[in-house]
Image: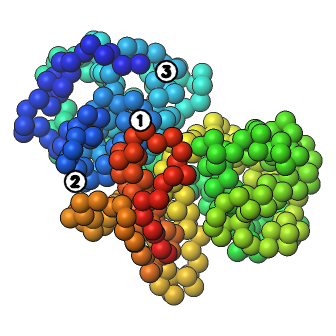
Amino acid sequence: MSIATDTGWQAEFGLDQQNAPGRFATRQILESPGETFSQGHVLRRAFDALELDGAVCADNAPLVYFKLTATLDAEYVRTLHRRFWNHGGAPLLVLVGSSEVQIYSGLSRPVAPGAIQGAHPTLVERLTRSSVALREFLPSVETGEFFRRHARSFNPEHKVDRALLDNLQATREHLSTAGRRALDPEILDALLCRLVFTCYLFDRGVIGASYLASLGIPNATHLRDILGLPSRGNARRALYLLFRQLGQDFNGDLFSDDLAAEESAVPDDHIAPLNEFFRGADVRHGQQSLWPYDFSVIPIETISAIYERFLRPSDREAGSFYTPRFLAEVVLDIALAKQPTLLNRRYLDPACGSGIFLVGLFNRIAQEWRRANPTARNERQFTGATILA
């Protein structure tokens, strides 16, 4: 819902000057021949998911997203902020209205529908259009003064990946002691990873109601419908029926374990805590709230981060370490800086753990292929490179 005719907002923020802080991008600039941006694929996803009008980057990472909007209605902003938070690419979202600018934090949890009383809880600051404060905004962000002044609005624990992993870890700890018999830690870890990936498939629209109906699971459209079946035994059986089909339909080893043996090992009383987690319960604090996570927007790399949380001391002693997403992106920027194209090449990660480097690399390859094949309709045509783990 942008204001298509508003062309003066860039000048109001000082973005028309060559000495503007950081690097400024629009969708047109991102697609310009020969123009390269660090984490360009992250920016393109943000422009597509949020319909942005601009972005400022600093230190090889997105810093501020700009969006022109004809409305600052509370419910519209709530929905937009939830999507922005799930994307997790930048700490600041700036909504530019006709007379007012509103700045929102990406490190504040989204809120439930109807829960806003007064100011939006994630609103950091309001500014008047054409005011001196707009010119001062970006320099204060670049120096860090803006974040120091509003420190309460930027809690690292509330970032989407941290919040998801903390709650998932709490669920794991709860399940490790729940029920009449303890579940083998390796089975528990595999089950949680499969559940998160399956949720990702549903949210991305890869599978849905017709897929479940073909398996004999009627009146269900999502993973939550399976976990929420009245009979926990039926829920467990339907879940593993789905897992076995996914193992046949998707290439990879996530569903290649002995699922029959695992199904018999998972007690029915583990289904209820899993159902609570996927319906938004804060397991650590015992609170029921909005399910804030949207895997149609959350980068797939975030799922790789689960690997870090489930590393045991013996894994670390053997040399297994998780690389954070932002660091993997920086390494890829450096390694690929002089490559004119990523297509028609072979890539090897001999120390592949969570696969975060390969996932980041594949994202970049896919983006380049789509730009080179704008009229292609079938993603199965993609044969741009070979990636080896």
Whether residue 215 is visible: yes
**Which x, y percent locates residue 249?**
71, 58
Whether residue 152 is visible: no
Residue 71 image-quadrant placement: top left
Upstream in sequence: badge 2 or badge 3: 2
- Kindly identify the amino acid type of the residue bearing the numbered disc 2: Asp
191 relative to 296 in the view: left or right: right
Is disc 1 in contact with disc 3, using a CB cutoff of under 8 Å? no
Query: Which residue is denoted by mark 3 in the rendering?
Result: 76
Residue 317 lies, with reference to residue 100, above or below; the image says below
- Kindly identify the amino acid type of the residue bearing the numbered disc 1: Asp
Query: Which residue is denoted by mark 1 in the rendering?
Result: 48
32 relative to 226 in the view: left or right: left
Q: Secondary structure at mark 1?
A: helix
| Tag of residue 59 | 2
Residue 23 image-quadrant placement: top left
Q: Secondary structure at mark 2?
A: loop
